[in-house]
Image (cartoon, rainbow, N blue to C red):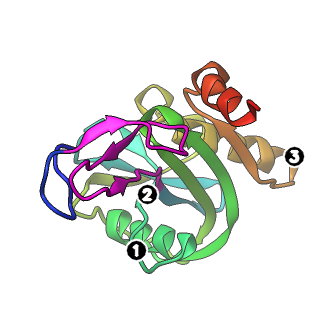
Amino acid sequence: MNFCSNCGKAVALKIPPGDNRMRFCCDFCGAIHYQNPRLVVGTLPAWDDLVLLCRRAIEPRHGFWTLPAGFLENDETTAEGAARETIEEAGARIELGPMFTMFDVVHVQQVHVFYRARLLDLEFKPGIESLEVRMFSEADIPWRDIAFRTVSQTLEHYFSDRSRGVFELHTGNIGYSPRTVLPQAERLLAP
């Protein structure tokens, strides 16, 4: 960020009084511009023993396979966003199931949430952000060509849970080290 969205003057990156994190601050009007993680929401659509994957037509990771997912929009729930992304990227009609995975992706300031979903039929087609959409068995998943670690871990959890016959909610951190936030946490606890 270079300029204040309130007054148009230059901003400086600094810790505002009473805060403990670097923020973009406007010295002219006093505005503090907070930046928070963005939510990526999607589904793991399944039909019998098959799962639906999309091959990306956009960067990052153009040409790699992913689950249908994208950024949550304002004025929609995570479930609504996940269903919308499934239609937009795969043209697939689904019955949305429960939340299945949630990953903190700290290094890119994102949180990824995937829901299990049941395909209502096998009529699907690539959307504008997908080169192709295909069904895969566990044995045929192109593991080396999966676009993101959140997707590969979601698929791994799915196949593991499916083999046990019990689906759980899985959470985790991708590319996260507690050392990166420890100094900030220590400042919060300091007398």
Q: In the image, what residue occupies the spot 48% across and 44% down? A: 17
Please tell me whether mark 1 sits on a helix, a strand or a loop. Answer: loop
User: Relative to 139, is 108 on the left or the right?
Assistant: left
Task: Point out the image quarter for the N terminus.
Answer: top left
- Name the residue type under label 2: Ala
Label whose residue precedes the other's in the sequence (3 or 2)? 2
Residue at figure coordinates x 75%, y 34% from the top left: 189
Residues in magenta, as a range: 11-39
Label 3 and label 2: CA atoms lie apart by: 26 Å
Task: Confirm whether the magenta stretch covers residue 89.
Answer: no
Q: Residues within 10 Å of mark 2 (few under 14, many from 20)?
A: many
Instruction: State the image coordinates of residue 106 (x, y, percent, origin top left).
Output: 52, 36
* Residue denoted by label 2: 69
**Going from the N terminus, do you reach mark 1 or mark 3 first?**
1
Name the residue carrying label 3. 164
- Disc 1 from disc 3: Cα separation: 37 Å
Q: Which residue corresponds to the image point at 58% horizontal and 56% vertical from the top-left?
A: 114
Residue 70 appears left or right of 101: left
Q: Where does label 1 land, which residue?
A: 74
Say which of 28 and 107 sits in front.
Answer: 28
The disc labelled 3 sits on which kind of residue? Arg
The residue mark sitting in front, 2 or 1, is 1
The mark closer to the camera, 3 or 2, is 2
Residue 148 vertical placement versus 3 (above, below): above
Q: Which three-letter amino acid code belongs to the residue tagged 1? A: Asn
Q: Earlier in the sequence, mark 2 or mark 1?
A: 2
